[in-house]
Amino acid sequence: MIHVHLDQTMMALADPTRRAILKHLSQKEARVTEIARPFDMSLNAVSKHILILERARLVHRRRLGREHFISANLEPLIEAADWIDEYRRTWEERLDRLGEYLKELQAKENIDKQRKERKKCRRKK
């Protein structure tokens, strides 16, 4: 089930307009009309973006009479960050091992160079 939520979260975050809406809402709750104000699009288009954010559980809607108030829910972002962090740790471990291997190769190469130089010096004598 978490992967379904993760897919929805990533899909919702893929759009720059939705990311901007979420950033605005992370500061404070707002009416749909307030959210729409900075965007050069119809209220209906902004409402569709908000609906996608709702489906991804990134925002909550609260109704007070005819007013709709939208607020951010950062829990799905935490879940996504945790998922990404798992892969970050895996890749860091792999890259650390690669770094160690490359250091070993470099050290071997340096030893081989030193041996060759000593042999050259002995031959010259």
Image (cartoon, helix red, strand yellow):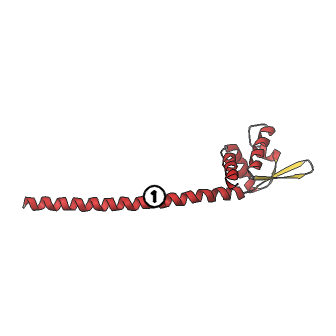
Report which residue position mark 1 lands on.
95
Classify the position of the C terminus by image quarter. bottom left
Horizontally, residue 37 falls left or right of residue 98, namely: right
Q: Position of residue 27 (x, y in %)?
A: 74, 56
Q: Position of residue 111 (x, y in %)?
A: 25, 62
Residue 14: name its quadrant. top right
Q: Position of residue 20 (x, y in %)?
A: 70, 47
Which amino acid type corresponds to the residue marked 1 in the rendered image? Leu
- How many circles with numbers are drawn on the protein? 1
Work out whether 14 lies above or below 42: below
- Between residue 5 and residue 68, name the one nearer to us: 5
10 Å crowding of disc 1: few (<14), some (14-19), many (20+): few
Classify the position of the N terminus by image quarter. bottom right
Q: Position of residue 18 (x, y in %)?
A: 71, 46
Residue in the picture at 74% in, 41% down: 39
Work out whether 104 lies above or below 39: below
Residue in the picture at 77% in, 41% down: 48
Q: Residue furthest right?
A: 65
Residue 103: name its quadrant. bottom left
Residue in the picture at 14% in, 60% down: 119
Residue in the picture at 72% in, 51% down: 22
Element type at mark 1 = helix
Horizontally, residue 7 falls left or right of residue 110, namely: right
Q: Residue furthest left?
A: 125
Horizontally, residue 94 falls left or right of residue 112, namely: right
